[in-house]
Amino acid sequence: MNGTNNGPVVIGIAGCSGSGKTSLAQELARELEGTHFHLDHYYHDLSHLSYEERCKQNFDHPDALQSDLLISQIGELASGHSIALPQYDFSAYTRIPGASVTIYEPHFLLVDGILALHYEGLRRLYHLGVYVDTPDEICYQRRLARDVRERGRTQESVAKHYAETVRPMAEEFVRPSAQYADLIVDGTSSFDWSVEQVLSVLRKKQLLAAHDMFVKDGFAGHP
């Protein structure tokens, strides 16, 4: 992990679906007053396929993301520039034509995704890579609860998808990417402890000077 010197501190956070990586990224973005940046915006536009064909695609494989655009745009952010973030319609599996959101982050950029540590081009942009290590059975139970509660799916459909796609892709691509992490945190441990572990490493790397000054002056951090 090298990062750049001209833009924000870039932190990549990876882990299996249901590992707790997104919660960690969100909390760190809040703590550091930075930007939570999710890789899901970079799924390929599948508008050329029928809806039935789109539903059959493997969205957990690295090829499901437009990695060239992803790496290019995070590179722009890492260099201190703004980007036009594409917008994705997850219900239709298509890009929203002509829709984008301008993103600019001068301080801390938290890059979150199951494949955040998979792509070599991304890893070169990070100042710190974090992997959230959580047992498969816990990931599955969290995924099951979320998909039934928030996405209206049946337990049977979630179990089938997890067994056929999510788990195999995690074993092939996600879990092996832990080898590239600078820090591995336990996805079953205290959430506050995981946050403090990341902050501690950032301090050791002297990447928290601005944040610590804000905290000292009472502008950020927990009351």
Image (cartoon, rainbow, N blue to C red):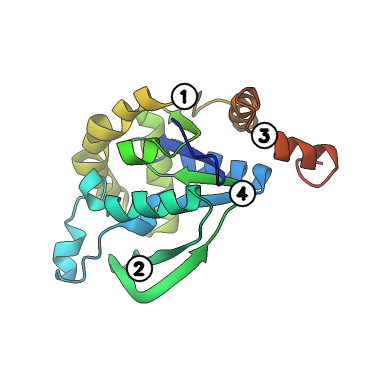
Q: Give the residue pinned by disc 3.
A: 208
Residue 188 is situated, as x and y percent measured from the top left of the image, at 51, 27
Residue 34 numbered tag: 4
For marks 1 and 3, give the one nearer the viewer.
3
Q: Give the residue pinned by disc 1.
A: 182
For marks 2 and 3, give the one nearer the viewer.
3
Q: CA separation, marks 1 and 3? A: 16 Å
Crowd rating for badge 3 (residues with CA inside 10 Å; few <14, some 14–19, many 20+): some
Type of amino acid under label 1: Asp
Residue 7 numbered tag: none
| Residue occupying the point 20% across, 60% down | 55
Residue 184 is situated, as x and y percent measured from the top left of the image, at 47, 24
Type of amino acid under label 3: Leu
| Residue occupying the point 78% across, 38% down | 213
Instruction: Locate the C terminus and report the quarter of the image it occupies.
Output: top right
Callout 2: SS: strand
User: Of the residues under marks 2 and 3, which one precedes in the sequence?
Assistant: 2
Callout 4: SS: loop
Instruction: Locate the N terminus and report the quarter of the image it occupies.
Output: top left
User: Of the residues under marks 3 and 4, which one precedes in the sequence?
Assistant: 4
97 in relation to 22, above or below: below
Q: Is residue 86 left or right of residue 23?
A: left
User: Of the residues under marks 2 and 4, which one precedes in the sequence?
Assistant: 4
Q: Quadrant of residue 132?
A: top left
Q: Give the residue pinned by disc 2.
A: 89
User: Of the residues under marks 4 and 1, which one precedes in the sequence?
Assistant: 4
Q: CA separation, marks 2 and 4? A: 25 Å
Crowd rating for badge 2 (residues with CA inside 10 Å; few <14, some 14–19, many 20+): few
